[in-house]
Image: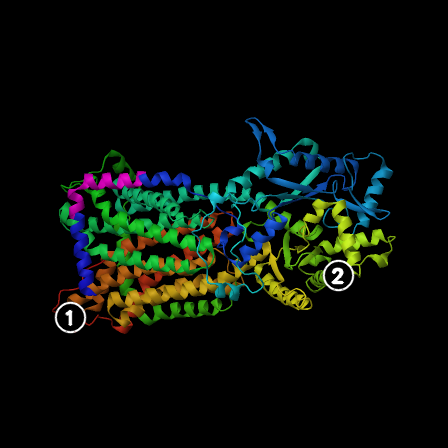
Amino acid sequence: MNTLLNGLSTFLARASNVIRQRKYLVTVIFAGLTALLFQNLSQLKFDFTIDGWFDKNDPTFVAYNEFNAQFGSQDGVLIVYKPIDGDVFSEASLKAAKGIRDELLGGFIETKDGKDFALSHIVDVKSLVNAPVLTARGDVLVSRPLVGDAVPSDKSELETIRALAQEQPEFELQYFSKDMKYGGIYIKTDFGAVPFEEDELLVTDTNPDKDMIMENMDYVQEDSREDTPRFKPTDVAEYYALNESIKHILAKPEYAEHFEYFKVGNTIDSENQAKIGKEMGMLYLMALVIMIVLLWLLFRSFSGVFWPLLIIVLTAIWTLALAVQFGLSATPLTICVVLLILTIGMADAVHIISGYLYFRREGEEHGKALELSYKKAGVACFLTSLTTMVGLMSLSFSYMVPIKGFAIMSTTGVGVAFILTIFLLPAMLEFWAPVSKSGKDRSNSVSRVIGRMIPNFAPFFQTQLNKVIPLVEKAPVFYVIPFVMLFVVCLYGSTKIHADYNLTDAYAEGARFRQSIELIDDKMAGSGRISVYFDLDQENAIHDPKVLKVIEGLQQKFETDYSEYVVTTSSIVDVVKDANQKLNGGGKDMYKIPESKSALSQTLFLFNIADPDERATMVDEYYRKASVLVTVRNYGSYAYTDVFKRMKKDIDAATASISNDYPKAQVSVTGFFAMGMRVAQYVIVTQLESYGLAILVISIILLLVFSSLKAGVISLIPNLIPSFIPLGILGIMGTPLDFYTMMLAPIVIGISVDDTIHFITQYRKEVLIDGNIHRALKSTINECGQAVVFTSLILGLGFGIMATSSMPGYANLGKFGFICIFTGLLNDLFLTPALILLTKMRFNYKETVEQEPVTDMVSA
């Protein structure tokens, strides 16, 4: 391994000389590649939808698409309105509700720029005005809207409408609250249900392992089929455009002066996504300002500030452009990718420039100083990039598409940053170095003024760092015990951790979207919708009373056994019982499923004639497939995972009674809630697998690099502690692991191991000189201390700036990232030297003292 590392070190040193001599050619090549890749950025697609988390052949996604193909999109908008007069059945309320519905179905709105056709995505709008009411005229069923085209002004007529609505068993909570102070409008869209054209279909997706999928998603009873329908993904811009059109209508004075609105749905959430995007832009700008300040404090040179910034800008362009080539879409996690590029991408350049300045201060001329910097720091940069990429790439084993995409994009970003640092930075420094080639001070009047305004803290800072080792030497055990105790506490806390996803987690307390969810759960039918999808695989199976009784039994069981979660259920069964009652005199005893198949068939036939559109939302035209709509309250996925498992058992037990008659029957739980549960389950599996793999591979790398079990263990221990901190804190506080904090462990171990590698390799070079541990530690802190501290500052503050985000997920990522990285720095400065002193680690000094020491792999 020493031979390999020395060979790589020599190659990097020689490469820097070749690049300097061909600086114009190298610059033109990289400029051309950047221009070529930049053209791809316009093709980057954004996918913030829940279905974007799944592979196209995933069983959950298959069931979701098959349901959409038969019954239309489940991706709608629920608007709950509160009239100022406190009565949804007043003339003013009904007129306003009717006006809103009519305008939503208008297909377009007039704007100052012309017609906006975003409303064309709306398929149907259901409200009190057009709520279907079944009546019987002799032996014929008639379906008519509750209000119709004209809203009456007569109070007696309005009271008749109120009484008729109260008689309909399915209307309460769906169209109005129990106290009649809130009304509901449901907008059905075509999002997620627009089929691909034949020439648009892509066949590049891969199949996940089906056994693993079914093991982790056992409440889906659906196999992937070759003829599975496929639909176009919904772009966030489409959501945003529709939301703007809806807002335009609702804001009209004739509606807004009478109604207060509470809205939920992906379309409504798009506004928050846009807000987060703008917010992240500001946070990135703040992070850049912090980095500029830190770079100036470290290098005291505009060149030392400008070139690292250019490296990260180019890295961001290359990474996002290559993501397009890889067929990846931008997701909410892409924000984290950009943050990683801002922070990690700068670290390599900082070490190289820091090393260059160190050797210039030692009297080396420009070319030699740059060669020595790459010779000594280049290999360490390679190893740190490699370990970081391993930590990030471990997430690629996730079954969730965005997490896999995040792993690929972030790994690519770290690799690109390393390539640009090794093969482009030498040319940049040849054009403009922090110190002139003659060694003279090249600072201009501006930099001199800034220098006088901001004192040079470097000497003072180094003086403080030089005090670290003498402190640790006095009582190394004293510094080991607190870190060990912290690790034990975090390890214990991590055993208490559980994954949980909740719609409200993305919103701060008091956010309107969060308030809307809570109000709809409290006053109406619930903010969530799931569907139980029946495919009996036989025509006219729904004409069988036994089948409908199975569905009826499931509805009753869901409403009673899961009343904490389930608010209402509805299906063709409810329509059949209502129609049967009205066709047979209206007696309460007739509100039931007809006993004979012929009577049931006749009832279904009459309902289809009366309202074929409403029938199509519940059963297909061949009466082979049916859906049960279940409205639910918003709870976390941790609770719903158990609920869905129990529901799956209930479904199995209920359908067993008809399995002989319908052996090919399949039942699936689908909808956004079902898909959300799948995501939550895989979070746990992904976390355990990726974290374990990251530790294993990084441990192997460290053992190979240092060729010592003792050195490998000492290198790994300081990085396990910061990795377990977020898990430990979350577990002790009882806070669930979400999509963002769950990624911290593999990311942090990949990042924090960087400084450890720089520290240990520098120490190894020093201790192999004379075997003096104390002198070697002091020299290590003196030579690489500032660079290690400043890179940690850049990384820690880069993450920490996200703590100010209004989105809790990103804020937690920032808080925990900041804590983890600075804990890792304290580990490197205090715990690592303490462990070295206690174990007397000399890297076999006696056996290797006559040999050429291993190449120094760190910068000053």
Res 759 → quadrant: bottom left
Q: Residue at 79%, 55% (x, y): give it.
A: 577
Up-down: is 839 above or below 322?
below
Q: Are marks 2 and 1 in contact (CB under 8 Å)?
A: no
Residue 155, given in percent of the width and then of the height, sits at: 85, 37
Say which of marks 2 and 1 sits in front. 2
Image disc number at residue 206: none
Q: Mark 1 points at which residue?
A: 848
Q: Is 104 placed left or right of 728 in the picture? A: right
Q: Which of 668 and 251 is in front in this view?
A: 668
* Residue 16 is at least partly visible in this image: yes
Image disc number at residue 545: 2
Residue 31, given in percent of the width and then of the height, sits at: 27, 39
Crowding at dot 2, Cα within 10 Å, few <14 / some 14-19 / many 20+, comes out as many
Residue type beneath disc 1: Thr
Res 530 → quadrant: bottom right
**Image quarter in which the C terminus is found:** bottom left
Residue 727, given in percent of the width and then of the height, sits at: 46, 63
Q: Residue at 54%, 27% (x, y): give it.
A: 113
Q: Does residue 34 belong to the magenta stretch?
A: yes
Stretch in magenta: 17-35
Q: Does residue 375 belong to the magenta stretch?
A: no
Residue type beneath disc 2: Pro
Up-down: is 533 above or below 653?
above
**Image quarter in which the N terminus is found:** bottom left
Q: What element carries label 1?
A: helix
Crowding at dot 1, Cα within 10 Å, few <14 / some 14-19 / many 20+, comes out as few
Q: Is 132 placed left or right of 60 in the picture? A: right
